[in-house]
Amino acid sequence: MKKIILAALILLNSGCASMFSGTTQTISLRSEQKGTKFYLNNEDLGSDTAIVQISKKNLKSSVLVAKKAGCIDAQSFIPTKFDATSLLGVLLDFGLISILVVDWGITGAVQEAERTHFVLTPNCT
């Protein structure tokens, strides 16, 4: 009996989107201007090209910025869309725990980035 309860708790504590799609998203950045520095929410990511892992829960509030001395900064928010993989939770527990609590509330895996590659180029005219 204890094994059945333990198995049920393990299944109910995981959401389908977080299991199959993960809880982070990899975003890549590049610029057409040499010497461009990239930032994610004021955190330095590097120059000219950058790759960053962002928690899906933080995608909507994240701001990507490209800066170069003497140029106007370029910035972009990360557009998100619904991750349909989370709907598999309907089969598991009618979505009550797996979708609403785990994928939406705890991990944010119910959303994913619409784009994972960004070209941000500061305006140097």
Image: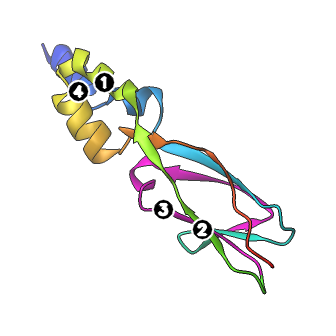
| Mark 3 vs 2, N-terminal side | 3
Which label sits in the foreground, 2 or 1?
Answer: 2
Please name whichever residue, 104 or 4, is drawn nearer the observer in this view of the structure: 104
Asked if the magenta segment contains residue 30, the reply would be no
| Mark 2 vs 1, N-terminal side | 2
Q: Quadrant of the C terminus?
A: bottom right
Question: Dot 4: few (<14), some (14–19), or many (≥20) neighbours within 10 Å?
Answer: some
For the record, the magenta segment spans 44-68
Which residue is rendered at x = 45% and y = 53% of the image?
Answer: 59
Question: Dot 2: few (<14), some (14–19), or many (≥20) neighbours within 10 Å?
Answer: some
- Tell me how many marks there are: 4
- Which residue type carries mark 3? Ser
- State left or right for residue 113 relative to residue 60: right
- State left or right for residue 79 relative to residue 48: left
| Mark 3 vs 4, N-terminal side | 4
For residue 57, above or below residue 40: above
Question: Dot 3: few (<14), some (14–19), or many (≥20) neighbours within 10 Å?
Answer: some
Which residue is rendered at x = 84% and y = 72% of the image?
Answer: 35
Residue position for label 2: 75
Disc number for residue 87: 1
Question: What colouring style does the render use?
Answer: rainbow
